[in-house]
Structure formats: structure tokens, C-alpha cells
Amino acid sequence: MIRAPYSAPLRLADIGLGRSIALRPSPAERARIGRALDLAALDRLEGELRIAPWLDGAEITGAWRAEAVQTCGVTLDPLPVSLSGRFALRVVPAGSPHAPSPDVEIELDPDAPDPSDVLDADGVLDLGVYLVEQLALELDPFPRKPDAVFEPPEADPAPSPFAALAALKRD
């Protein structure tokens, strides 16, 4: 099992009638997140989440903001980025009748809501994982400074097949 770079666990049984939670990873946690996402730096990451009961699980809605530094894929220079977003998702416990069936093929409809996430048998949802996931989804996989221009190196001219013969003739 891969260890998450940032964890903020919440038991499904502890949601009650609903909760608001602010997530603000420490500098050490941000450094782990930055390494996991291949960032030069993660100066800020914060999220405001609302967790409410939904069927036999929970609905999580939230907003997040981040200040990060990626590396330009062309110049290898630091590239500061400001990111933010909103998200909503639903989770259900393992064995829930509302869980998506693994035997049914999922139809991809960009306008339909995402299927519910299924929690492990322990009934713990990790809000930190969802926050990092949202950040990862918004990062540019090919960061490039606006003025960066790729200039390929000059190719060596292909040697003539007669170059070896000319070298022999000089000797």
C-alpha cells in the first residue's frame, strides 16, 4: 500500500449532521506533497471542506487554493503557479447497496456525476488524499513558461560514406 503524502482521516461515524473542516498542511507535509507531485516547491495549500451525510455515506464539497512552483519543461526554469478550485464527491462504506457495482461497465458521461468512492472496510475517509488529488488534477502535466521556445540542437551532418576513404588517401 502506498502511503499518502498528506493524510487527514475522518471516520464516517464522526460526521454527525455535518462538519466543516479546514485543511492546512504543515511545511513538512507540503514538502512531502511537493515531492510526490514533482513540484519544485509547494508554498501554500489550503482547503475548506464541508462533509454532510448522504445516504449511508457522505458528500464532500470544498474549495481549495495552492501556490506552487513547477519546473518549465523547456528551459528548466522555476515556473510559479497559482491554482484553485471547487469540488464535490460522494463516498459510501464498503458493502453499501449504493456502491457502484464492479461487474457493471461504467458509461463515461461528462455531464453525469461521478460514481461514489467506496471506503475501505474501516469506514475512514481521508480528506487529505482528496485535497492532494484535486491539486494533482489541476497541475499542468507539461509546464511551460509563456515565452519559452524550444530550439533543437544542431544536428551533426551525416558522414559521407566516402569520408573514410578520403581519410585513408591522406595517410
Image (tube, rainbow, N blue to C red):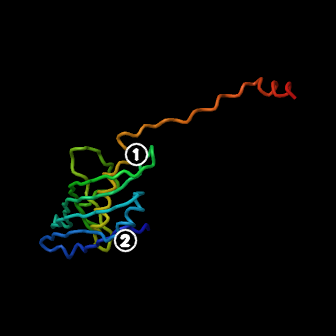
Q: Is residue 164 left or right of residue 43?
A: right
Q: Quick one: quadrant of the N terminus?
A: bottom left
What percent of the width, then of the height, locates residue 20? Answer: 16, 69
> Image height check: is 92 above or below 137?
below
Residue receiving disc 2: 28
Q: Is residue 143 above or below residue 39?
A: above
Q: Amino acid at mark 1?
A: Phe
Rendering coords of residue 73 (x, y %)? 44, 46
Q: Is residue 147 above or below residue 118?
A: above
Q: In the figure, residue 66 lies in which quadrant?
A: bottom left
**Please, what is the three-letter code of the amino acid marked with disc 2?**
Ala
Q: Residue at the spot x=31%, y=48% of the render?
A: 106
* Mark count: 2
Q: Which residue is mark 1?
A: 142
How far apart, in angstroms, are the residues tagged by discs 2 and 1? 26 Å
Q: Residue at x 37, y 71 (%)?
A: 28
Quadrant including the C terminus: top right
**Tag of residue 104:** none
Q: Within 10 Å of the Cα at label 2, are there few (<14), some (14-19), or many (20+) other Cα atoms?
A: few
Residue for point 49% across, 35% down: 151
Q: Residue 105 location in percent, x, y?
A: 33, 48
Q: Foreground residue, 132 or 88?
A: 132
Q: Secondary structure at mark 2?
A: helix
